[in-house]
């Protein structure tokens, strides 16, 4: 087994040498997407996804290995539960080796959705910057069971590489932000603006505004970013009695 620096060099070369998939955005977004693809292959997973945290904002999905992984990552943002959420809170890896048993107790909404997509185990690796968490790299497997020691080391190295890619050329944080050039991702400003608009419109707290936005996204099977953009764009208004399915779109 190679040591840390050698493993990092080897994995970096694998990601760099990975052929761009159809729809590859290039830049950091493309590199992170290829990282997820290589991770799935190297640790025998069925999916992988990366969410980032910026300025204490809600997590943002920036790269996944495929549609199912993207759906699971987005669902955690909507539900406010799942391995990514727990890893952010605990600032440590989260391993759930059997979603069909303990997972249903741990994440009563997320786990059934994951099982419906044939995911039996999930593992979340926080991207640590000192004492802060810059994001989380999730790994999904079909069969219940643990990762081997070697696979854990591999996944941790992929997380280190993802952090390196995210922070690349970030010498002056006042000029560039980690989410810039991650085309198609939702920015914290969009979600904060939507929260603020709902708070003012309905006369509720900022926290309750987020609950309303998440409830609508979940009930309507929409991405959180799409709902936020509809609110800020004036095409969606959440009614005072809205519980997720009582929205009033603006014509």
Image: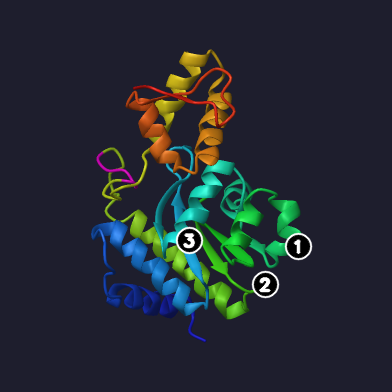
Q: Position of residue 59 (x, y in %)?
A: 48, 44
Q: Which mark is residue 205?
A: none
Q: Secondary structure at mark 1?
A: helix
Q: How many marks?
A: 3
Q: CA distance from mark 1 to mark 3?
A: 21 Å
Q: Residue at 47% of width from left, 73% of height from top? A: 40
Q: Is residue 82 left or right of residue 54?
A: right
Q: CA distance from mark 1 to mark 2?
A: 10 Å
Q: Residue at 53% of width from left, 25% of height from top? A: 209
Q: Secondary structure at mark 3?
A: helix
User: Which mark is first along the chain, 2 or 1?
Assistant: 1
Q: Is residue 198 above or below residue 110?
A: above
Whether residue 189 can be seen here? no
Q: Is residue 98 above or below residue 56?
A: below
Residue 178 in magenta stretch:
yes
Mark 1 crowdedness (10 Å alpha carbons): few <14, some 14-19, many ≥20: few
Name the chief secondary structure element in magenta: loop
User: Which mark is first along the chain, 3 or 1?
Assistant: 3
Which residue lies under the disc numbered 1? 101
The magenta-colored residue range is 175-179
Which residue lies under the disc numbered 3? 68
Q: Is residue 199 above or below residue 147?
A: above
Is label 1 in contact with label 2 (beta carbons under 8 Å)?
yes
Q: Nearer the viewer, mark 3 or mark 2?
A: 3
Is label 3 in contact with label 2 (beta carbons under 8 Å)?
no
Colour setup of the view = rainbow
Q: Which mark is residue 144?
A: 2
Residue 193 in magenta stretch:
no
Q: Position of residue 144 (x, y in %)?
A: 67, 72
Q: State the image quarter where residue 33 is shown.
A: bottom left
Q: Position of residue 175 (x, y in %)?
A: 24, 40
Quadrant of the drawing holding the C terminus:
top left
């Amino acid at each position: 087994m190679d040591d840390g620096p050698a493993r990092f060099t080897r994995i970096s070369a694998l990601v760099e040498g990975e052929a761009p998939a159809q729809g590859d955005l290039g830049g950091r977004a493309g590199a992170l997407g290829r990282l997820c693809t290589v991770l799935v292959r190297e640790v025998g997973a069925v999916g992988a996804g990366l969410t980032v945290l910026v300025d204490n904002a809600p997590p943002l999905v920036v790269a996944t290995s495929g549609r199912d992984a993207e759906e699971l990552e987005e669902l955690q943002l909507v539900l406010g539960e799942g391995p990514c959420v727990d890893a952010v809170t605990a600032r440590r890896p989260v391993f759930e080796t059997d979603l069909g048993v303990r997972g249903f107790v741990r994440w009563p909404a997320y786990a059934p959705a994951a099982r419906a997509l044939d995911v039996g185990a999930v593992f979340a690796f926080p991207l640590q910057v000192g004492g802060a968490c810059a994001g989380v790299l999730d790994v999904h497997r079909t069969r219940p069971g643990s990762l081997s020691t070697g696979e854990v080391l591999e996944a941790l190295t992929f997380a280190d590489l993802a952090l390196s890619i995210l922070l690349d050329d970030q010498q002056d944080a006042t000029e560039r932000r980690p989410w810039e050039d991650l085309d198609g991702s939702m920015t914290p400003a969009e979600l904060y603006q939507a929260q603020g608009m709902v708070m003012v419109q309905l006369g509720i707290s900022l926290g309750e505004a987020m609950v309303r936005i998440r409830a609508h996204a979940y009930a309507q099977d929409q991405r959180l970013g799409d709902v936020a953009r509809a609110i800020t764009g004036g095409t969606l208004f959440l009614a005072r009695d809205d519980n997720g399915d009582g929205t009033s779109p603006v014509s």
